[in-house]
Image (cartoon, grey):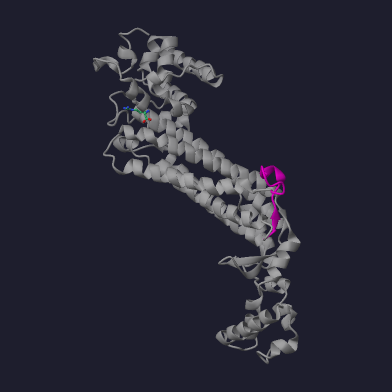
Amino acid sequence: MSNTDNPHGKPWGGRFSEGTDALVEAFSESVSFDRRLYAQDIAGSKAHARMLGRAGVLSDTEVTAIVEGLDVIQQEIEGGHFNWSTRLEDVHMNIEACLTDRIGEAGKKLHTGRSRNDQVATDVRLYLREAIDVLDGELKKLQQALVDLAEREVDSVMPGFTHLQVAQPVSFGHHMLAWFEMTVRDRARLADVRKRVNVLPLGAAALAGTTYPIDRVFVAEQLGFDGVTENSLDSVSDRDFAIEFTAAASLIMMHLSRWSEELILWASSQFGFVNLPDRFCTGSSIMPQKKNPDVPELVRGKTGRVYGDLTALLTLMKGQPLAYNRDNQEDKEPLFDAIDTVLASVSLFAAMIPHIEVKREACRKAAAQGFSTATDLADYLVRKGVPFRDAHAVVGRSVQFAMQQGRDLAELELSELQQFSDVIAEDVFEVLTLEGSLAARNHIGGTAPEQVRAAAARARSRIT
Ligand code: ARG
């Protein structure tokens, strides 16, 4: 490459009378982080070159030289032999300059009819589309693990909580299927985001389109896009698709963070509901007895990072006039961070959930405490004709009495219960059992084992 080709060492150096300040070069380079777009950049360039060939802008020989040259560059990058240069700013100019070094004149023609503005928008969309597909695959694995666990634990009873106080007994499987439902919505949100990500912006060029006879639909087909963007200014400018993804990722993290909180509590000796596999925990350097739930703790902690990425992206866009501004270069680090963090977190959950050991006896014992069947007693009184508010008060007094005695409702004598209402009979003890309580909630969405078994079967068939 001679100096006339690249004044001041920059592909755009022609109108400049001095080289870039070293501080500016260091400040404005993006290749240190956007090089991860290399495969998408090369795929986009190959499709663009083929399109220019069909349009008669490039000769067949030039197209072949470009495509083959880009293939070699891709191998070099993947082999770790590519020499990335911050002087060439970004992934796009690094690859283009290397191509020209290798194949000469034809390489200089690749950028005909496009701009880095539509190029980078294309690369990011391609990258994000792949990331969404990988993430969706991991969520699917997590769903399978949840349904397996739910089916295994349909008949295990645990306390259901409100306000973190024992409320009513539930099936452990039912609790797992609550998590499952969240993943269904998470995946639906990703699928929806993907529709808006998978539209080709290339052809917008710098901002207004290009004077060459380009065929955008051909490029879209080559790259697997569902269609082409409608407006050139919008195409190079908006990053709402990245924001949408990061919002969807934030919701996934929010869900994982809540599950993490539950797993951390459940794995504690105070709850003792589950045992997390050793290989997903770590020990303490000072306390030999410790086994810490680091994975859920880190997932809970990393949730904040993804929320931060979302805030960064929203703030990045809010002051920008149309069309492209260099601000947009700042979209990549938060987006990549959100992708990396959510993917690692979901993958870890998908790997860990199948190996969670449920301590059924401890769960059951906890469910039997805290007067968890008090509502069942109220419902029993209602069935015997007592108005619900009166029934509520009767049970309240029974609970107070049992507490003073240090006994549970089911441990009271019939005669003791009858002090509070004379409609109470021997059959009351059926409703005071955990099994009776669960079985009574026998409708779609309820915790009766029969329902949970059916819900798990439906859940399995809903995994697509
Ligand atoms: N590195 C830039 C980015 O990520 C590429 C586009 C630069 N365009 C420009 N006109 N400076 O946004």
Ligand 1 location (quadrant) = top left
Residue 171 position, x and y percent, is 68, 64
Q: Is residue 287 magenta?
A: yes
Which contiguous range is marked in magenta?
Answer: 271-290
Q: On the rendered image, what quadrant is the N terminus found in?
A: top left
Residue 343 visible in the current orientation: yes
Relative to residue 70, is residue 330 depicted above or below?
Answer: below
Viewer-closest of 290 and 182? 290
Viewer-closest of 107 and 38? 38
Q: Main secondary structure of the magenta part?
A: loop
Q: Is residue 203 left or right of residue 145?
A: left
Q: Residue at 38% across / 18% down in the picture? A: 87
Count of numbered tags: 0
Residue 418 position, x and y percent, is 70, 90
Residue 425 visible in the current orientation: no
Residue 332 position, x and y percent, is 42, 34
Q: Residue at 43% across / 15% down in the picture? A: 98
Residue 445 position, x and y percent, is 60, 65
Q: Is residue 73 left or right of residue 425?
A: left
Viewer-closest of 201 and 180? 180
Q: Quadrant of residue 8?
A: top left
Q: Residue at 70% across / 78% down in the picture? A: 406
